[in-house]
Image (cartoon, helix red, strand yellow):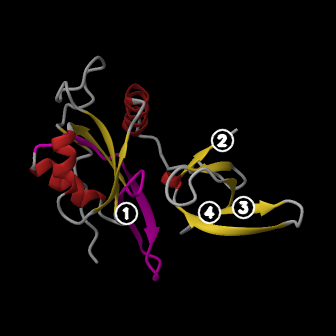
Amino acid sequence: MPILSSEPDCYPSNLWENDEALPVKPEGKWWCLHTKPRQEKAIARDLREQGLPYYLPQVVKESRTPKGRRIQSIAPLFAGYVFLHGDDHDRVAALRGNRLVNVLQVIDQDGLIRDLRQVRRMLDSGLTISAEDTMPIGAKVRITTGPLTGMVGTVIRRGNRDQFVAVVQFLGRGATVDLQDWQVEKIA
């Protein structure tokens, strides 16, 4: 499969230029689009064609071919996520097509804007940036969606799948289930 070229990381291009306000709909809010694997750039392209404001932070990744040749690609900083700014009508428009898994509602709008501005500033610095997991091995988490909502346990493995373990302390045994970061919240 060919590597796609970089999509613009935001639309409109002046999305983050003004510190006070975003140059988008005043009645709009931020949504987090959880994409199917490797669909972030395609969604960004679709959103730009529809004139919908988005942010897709991207980084340069360097790897090697089996023969040792170095190659560079442009990849999303947060694999599987694109941030959309708009109203409910725009959210529904983003759902058209078959590229999204879910649309996550952002409760703390000001906090997300602050965090995205920080990410933008880090990326603009020219330094090497990489994504970090928010739920490291050993983190205590609570499941927030699905049939296991409310269960508390521990992250025991990272990789292609994150595993959540519920332990019966008395027996010293546990059971695991595969989850995604968006399905759990970190607890103290």
Per the image, label 4 sits on a secondary structure element best described as loop
Which comes before the other along the chain, label 4 or label 1? 1
Q: Contact, CB < 8 Å: mark 1 with mark 3?
A: no
Determine crowd level at label 1: few under 14, some 14-19, many 20+ residues with C-alpha closer than 10 A.
Answer: few
What's the CA distance linking mark 4 and mark 2? 18 Å
x, y percent for residue 115:
44, 32
Per the image, label 2 sits on a secondary structure element best described as loop
x, y percent for residue 31:
31, 41
What's the CA distance linking mark 2 and mark 1? 37 Å
Circle 2 residue: 187
> Is 4 drawn above or below residue 183 in the view shown?
below
> Is 73 drawn above or below residue 118 in the view shown?
below
Magenta stretch, residue numbers = 51-80
x, y percent for residue 156:
70, 62
Q: Amino acid at mark 1?
A: Gln
Which comes before the other along the chain, label 2 or label 1? 1
Mark 4 or 3: in front is: 3
Circle 3 residue: 166
What's the CA distance linking mark 1 and mark 3? 40 Å
Q: Contact, CB < 8 Å: mark 4 with mark 3?
A: no
Q: Is residue 78 magenta?
A: yes
Circle 4 residue: 158
Q: Amino acid at mark 2?
A: Ile
Circle 1 residue: 72
> Is 140 drawn above or below residue 29 in the view shown?
below
Mark 1 or 3: in front is: 3
